[in-house]
Amino acid sequence: MILLVMSHSNGHLSKASYELAAVAERLEQDGPRTALVVGNGAGQAASEAARIADRVLVADEPELAHYDPEVWSAVVAQVARETHAHTILVSATRNGREYSPRVAVKLDAPLLEDVVSIHCDGGSLVATRYCFLTRVTETIESTSPVTVVTIKPGAFPVATAAEQSGEQAAVEVVVPQPRLKVVHKASEATDRVPLGEADIVVAGGRGLGTPQGFTELIGGLADQLGAAVAATRAVVDAGWRPYAEQVGQTGKTVQPKAYIAVGISGAVQHLSGMNRSKVIVAINTDPEAPIFNVADYGIVGDVQKIVPAMIQELRR
C-alpha cells in the first residue's frame, strides 16, 4: 500500500499534495492509495483528499493544531506501521524535508530525497534526483520492503480530482508530548498565488536598483500576469523582500511554466532554484550575464524601460 502524507493549509490541500497523487498513479503498485491528513480541524482538507485517493485516514487531534517535526514523524510512522505501507510519499516542502528523515529512522527504512522521477523495477523503487546545484542527475534504488520518498515540488503534474470521493476514516494516534511550543505565528496577507504553486513567476534581482523599483516593476508585472513574485538572495539580504520569496540554493526551488528573471545576473546558487522551469525569460543589461545561458528568451536592455513597456502593453 502507498501512503500519501497530505500537506494542507487553511482547509485546502497544497498543489504538492496533488502531485503526490500523480506519483502514486504512476507507480501502479498493488494496494489502494491511502492519504493521511494530519492536523486539527482537518475535515475540509480530508474531503478534498478523498477525491484524489482511494481512502483517507484522518488524524484530527487538538494537539496537532501546530506543526512539530517530532510529533508529525511519530504520527506518520505509527500510521505507516499499522497500515503496512510499503511506500510513504511526502512532499519535499520545508516541513516535509524536516520530518521525513525521522520517519525513515523510526521505520528503519531508506529515504529517497528530492525525487524528480520514480518508477517500479520488479521489487525495487528506482528514482532520480538532482545534486551539486542540479548539475548532476543521480539515480538511486531502494530494495527495502519499506521506503520513504520525498517528492520535489513541481517535478510532477498534478492529479485530476475524481467526481466520486473515496472513503474516509478517523485514525487514533498516539501524540507524543511536544518539546516545542508555538508562541506566535504571523503570515503576510497577499492576493497573489503562493510561490510554490504558481504557473508564472516574476523574479527580480539587485538590477532593479531600489526596493521601490522592485515593488513597482516586479510587483506591477506580476499583477498583470497573475504571477507570483520571487527574489534573489541579495535582494532578500538587503531587506527589500521577505525570505518567503527567495529562490535559489538557500531558498525555494520552483519549476513554473514560465519564469521571468528581471535584473538577475544568474549566479549558480540562484540558477539551482529555477533552471528547471519550462520557459525562462531573462531581462538584463549585460549580454554576457550567466542567466542568458539557461534562458529560452533573452532581452538585453534597461529593465527600467523594458518592464514598464511590458506592463503598459499588458494593460492594453
Image (cartoon, rainbow, N blue to C red):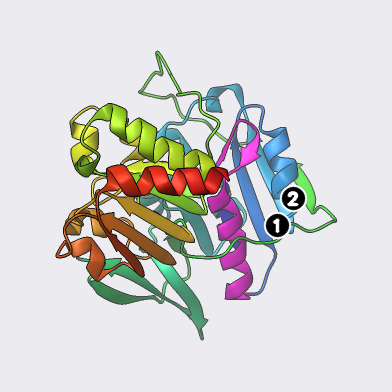
For the residue carrying disc 2, how many other residues have a C-alpha within 10 Å: few (<14), some (14-19), or many (20+)? many
- Residue 74 visible, this orientation: no
Question: Which element type, helix, strand or loop, lies under badge 2?
Answer: loop
| Residue 276 point in image, percent of width and height | 37, 65
Q: Nearer the viewer, residue 168 or 133?
A: 133
Task: Locate residue 213, reporting x and y percent.
Answer: 30, 32
Residue 288 lies in quadrant: bottom left
Q: Which mark is residue 273?
A: none
Residue 27 part of the magenta-drawn span = yes
Asked if residue 285 is among those painted magenta in the image, a careful observer would answer no
- Residue 267: x and y in percent read 17, 56
Horizontal arrangement in the rendering, residue 240 relative to residue 56 (left or right): left
User: Which residue is denoted by mark 2 in the rendering?
Assistant: 50
Secondary element type, mark 1: loop
Q: Are marks 2 and 1 in contact (CB under 8 Å)?
A: yes
Q: Is residue 304 left or right of residue 5?
A: left
**The one of 86 and 285 positioned closer to us in this rendering:** 285
The residue carrying pointer 1 sits among few (fewer than 14), some (14 to 19) or many (20 or more) residues within 10 Å by Cα, namely many
x and y, in percent, of residue 88 in the image: 51, 58
In this figure, which residue is indicated by the disc labeled 1?
Answer: 53
Residue at image x 73%, y 54%? 55
- The correct choice, above or below, for 21 with respect to 245 in the image is below
Amino acid marked by disc 1 = Ala
Magenta stretch, residue numbers = 8-29
